[in-house]
Image (cartoon, grey):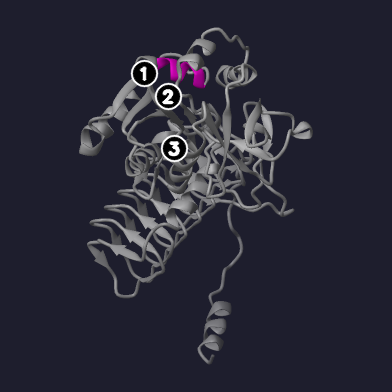
């Protein structure tokens, strides 16, 4: 791999994962998707790495690069237009000349074995290019491949569910022996959609360029919609080996079961149970009688008394108090008032639906809670229904029943009928309860 340049595309927009942003910088078990992709590329021996960022996340990538010595030789370029992969590749054009190039997306999570398989295919066939795909059981909103005699013959981008060309979905793990013709073609292809890159490959295929099909059968994680964060969260949690406990104070009554990471200066208080695989960040406090099960909780959080967090991904600096948080994704600096519940299961037990870009999307998840952006405050005794998304910088009052998405920067309050107050003329005796207490003492 040392003769191959790795091009990591991290400059596209993240509109489909609203209310979250910068999907490549979402941390999983302490590392962002960007860092995990870079680590895998370096481990595989990729000779040179170029990261394509956008104007909004460039400084964040710079910060990661400056704090990690292994990343300092990596080149960083800015994608000025976020309209598809072609613009990202063209932004790095000066680095690609006369190079073998491997194009990768951090939001396609794959296993290290794919790098080995790719090199074996290169050494055996010496193709013009290699396109990687995997077989899916359910519809995926991406590109589908047509294959004949182990060669890619067509790429169909986001086909109609009823007109699928097959079950092989394209991953962003594309090898080019030389990108000169690809770049020339992308500069000439015109499309109203963001599929110039895919159309350019199809154009090259029509000109007798040979693109081998690389089948991939390992784990494939993706990040198209916000609930996919839970898929990746589960995958990375399972990679925690044993128990890695650096906490400053764990009460002797607390129970820690299975694969669990607990960061520095964390505190685990009385009668708490943490069931792995789980990740607890540094400086976080898990309060009395709380249950954490198969969840990620970021740094400097306070999970207050009697809170249950299950199969969820929690950011940094979040505060909870007597809450139920099931199958939910919560960004940084979010607070839930006492008694607030993030429901995760429909009464009719059907899969949860969610609106994305004015389209109702089936999440294919029977259990899905809330997805909450950063800097949100929710009052006491509020109920958030399954699959609801809440935009950043929003406030939700006490006692609200929220069954639809809330845009960012909004205030949502409950409106009740006026309370009626009058003089109490009834005498309230204490004898009744005294008699009950006496009878209970004999049990």
User: For the residue labelled by badge 3, is the local secondary structure a helix, a strand or a loop?
Assistant: loop
**268 lies above or below 329:** below
* Mark 1 or 2, nearer chain start: 2
Q: Nearer the viewer, mark 3 or mark 1?
A: 1
Q: Quadrant of the C terminus?
A: bottom right
Q: Position of residue 75 (x, y in %)?
A: 29, 25
In this picture, which residue range is highlighted in magenta? 85-91
Residue 319 in magenta stretch: no
**In screen coordinates, is 105 left or right of 266?**
right
* Mark 3 or 1, nearer chain start: 1
Give the crowd class for mark 1: few <14, some 14-19, many >=20 residues within 10 Å.
some
Q: Residue furthest bottom?
A: 442
State how far apart marks 3 and 1 are (Cα).
31 Å
Q: Nearer the viewer, mark 3 or mark 2?
A: 2
User: For the residue labelled by badge 1, is the local secondary structure a helix, a strand or a loop?
Assistant: strand
- Residue identifier under label 2: 11
């Amino acid at each position: 791999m040392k003769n191959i340049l790795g091009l990591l595309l991290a400059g596209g927009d993240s509109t489909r994962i609203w209310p979250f942003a910068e999907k490549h910088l979402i941390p999983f078990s302490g590392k962002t998707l960007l860092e995990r992709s870079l680590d895998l590329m370096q481990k595989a021996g990729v000779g040179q790495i170029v990261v394509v960022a956008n104007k909004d996340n460039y400084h964040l990538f710079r910060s990661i690069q400056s704090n990690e010595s292994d990343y300092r030789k990596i080149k960083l370029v800015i994608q000025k237009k976020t309209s598809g992969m072609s613009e990202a590749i063209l932004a790095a054009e000066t680095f690609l000349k006369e190079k073998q190039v491997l194009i990768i997306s951090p939001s396609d999570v794959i296993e290290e074995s794919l790098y080995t398989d790719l090199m074996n295919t290169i050494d055996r066939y010496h193709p013009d290019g290699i396109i990687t795909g995997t077989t899916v059981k359910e519809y995926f909103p991406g590109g589908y491949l047509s294959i004949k005699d182990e060669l890619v013959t067509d790429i169909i981008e986001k086909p109609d569910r009823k007109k699928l060309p097959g079950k092989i979905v394209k991953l962003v793990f594309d090898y080019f022996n030389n990108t000169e013709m690809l770049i020339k073609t992308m500069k000439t292809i015109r499309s109203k959609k963001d599929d110039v890159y895919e159309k350019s490959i199809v154009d090259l295929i029509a000109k007798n360029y040979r693109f081998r099909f690389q089948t991939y059968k390992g784990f494939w994680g993706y990040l198209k919609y916000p609930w996919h964060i839970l898929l990746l969260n589960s995958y990375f949690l399972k990679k925690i080996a044993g128990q890695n406990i650096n906490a400053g104070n764990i009460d002797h009554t607390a129970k820690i079961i299975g694969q669990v990471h607990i960061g520095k200066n964390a505190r685990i208080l009385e009668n708490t149970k943490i069931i792995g695989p789980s990740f607890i960040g540094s400086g976080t406090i898990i309060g009395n009688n709380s249950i954490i099960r198969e969840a990620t909780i970021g740094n400097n959080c306070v999970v207050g008394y009697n809170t249950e967090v299950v199969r969820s991904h929690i950011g940094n600096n979040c505060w909870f108090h007597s809450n139920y948080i099931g199958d939910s994704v919560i960004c940084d600096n979010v607070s839930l008032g006492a008694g607030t519940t993030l429901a995760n299961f429909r009464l009719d037990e059907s899969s949860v639906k969610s609106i994305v870009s004015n389209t109702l999307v089936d999440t294919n998840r029977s259990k899905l809670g809330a997805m909450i952006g950063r800097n949100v405050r929710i009052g006491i005794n509020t109920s958030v229904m399954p699959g609801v998304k809440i935009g950043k910088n929003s406030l939700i009052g006490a006692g609200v029943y929220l069954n639809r998405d809330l845009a960012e920067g909004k205030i949502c309050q409950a409106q009740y009928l006026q309370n009626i107050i009058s003089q109490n003329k009834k005498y309230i005796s204490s004898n009744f309860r005294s008699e009950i207490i006496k009878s209970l003492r004999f049990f």
